[in-house]
Image (cartoon, rainbow, N blue to C red):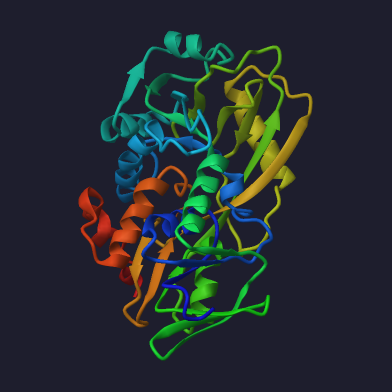
Amino acid sequence: MSDKFDVIIVGAGMVGASVAAALGSQWRAAIVETEAQAGYHTTGRSAAIWVRNYGPQDVRVLTGLSADFYHNPPADIGTDHLAVGREILYLAPAGQEQNLDGLIGQGLGVEEISLARAKGLCPAIRDGYAVRAALETDGFDMDVAALHQYYLRRAKAAGGQLMLRNRADRIERRDGLWHVHTAGGLEIAAPILVNAAGAWGDEVAEIAGLRPLGLVPCRRTAAIIDPAPWQVEHWPMVQSAGHDWYVRTEARTRLMVTPCDETPMPPHDVHPDDLDVAIGIDRMQQALDIEVRRVEHSWAGLRTFSPDRSLAFGFDRDAEGFFWCVGQGGYGIQTAPAASALVAAMIKGEDPGEAGAVIAAIDPMRFR
């Protein structure tokens, strides 16, 4: 198998799958994945909402460049609902006015609205909680599973191969190729290796004999509640301007609530913390008049950030053909169309177009 691939991608989540698809039929990709299911850890636990004004500037650029794909997807995307409109309502209690001003001043399409209009959009808002409010109108829910499967199909159609249950146990550069030995007994080789391992990105680099970047995996907790008697299907996503809680509609009749926690921890199959679930519900209930009788379901995922919280895409200067594609934090899904096209162009040495404006800011070698 070692002479059949042009690139090895470690990680089969949204990032690895989208890059494999974007490289196209001239670049056969071997996607190596530890788990039995592609996208098990982070992709499969995404909050699944596109928010233009979220993350650092490099993320916002790629988020904006991805919008057209979501609104005008390929015919074979596998869903009629890849993007479904969902406004984002920001509430500023006393002490968070500066956060709201920052969103309005630096954001695109975030406009201040009256508290009366805010309550019209979300009738459960408690009187007296917010002193100001703002609305972002171009957000939308994303069908993450459909997008991920689309990219995996595209990669396979281009001659790629998905290798599940194959943890990369040994990675070495030899004779101009990266050789990956897996726990499943495979040995594959290719001139380029893409590190799309998310929370395990530094671990993969160390296995390959490279210095880590200092990635920080952080736990994010979420829970599903029944907000009855409120009818929430058409509510906006509602969050504090300080981003210390938010709720969004789930399955038309439920709400997902999170305290927006970012607890650093080593990469592993992370589970929700009961205290974080309780904190999220408490913060929500300070703002919204919703009785929580029970938590129907809770989960947690890892959002992995670089030391400066910007993306880290690019070749490692200390190892030929080793390409970093990590540090997506909570932005990997909403940036996937533009980010994967950018990464493919960087690997191929092609013109990245508008996305090229962020290359200097996301160079992983800035941490060396």
Q: Which of the pair 16/213 is nearer the observer?
A: 16
Compared across the picture, whether 351 is left or right of 52 comes to left
User: Dividing the image into 4 quarters, which one contains the C terminus?
Assistant: bottom left
- Is residue 311 something that shows in the picture? no
Q: Which residue is at 37% across, 38% downward?
A: 69
Q: Which of the pair 94/299 is nearer the observer?
A: 299
The mark tally for this picture is 0
Q: Residue 47 at x, y = what percent?
A: 56, 39
Q: Choose top left, top right, bottom left or bottom right for residue 173.
A: bottom left
Q: Residue 196 at x, y = what percent?
A: 48, 63
Q: Residue 63 at x, y = what percent?
A: 35, 42
Compared across the picture, whether 41 is left or right of 323 comes to right
User: Dividing the image into 4 quarters, which one contains the N terminus?
Assistant: bottom right
- Is residue 65 something that shows in the picture? yes
Q: Which residue is at 51% across, 81% downward?
A: 2
Q: Which residue is at 29% across, 60% downward?
A: 345
Is 218 placed above or below 254 here? below
Q: Which residue of the protein is positioned furthest toward the bottom in this rendering?
A: 175
Q: Which of the pair 325/99 is nearer the observer?
A: 325
Q: Which residue is at 61% across, 64% downward?
A: 267
Q: Residue 287 at x, y = what percent?
A: 57, 22
Is 115 placed above or below 224 here? above
Q: Which of the pair 244/195 is nearer the observer?
A: 195
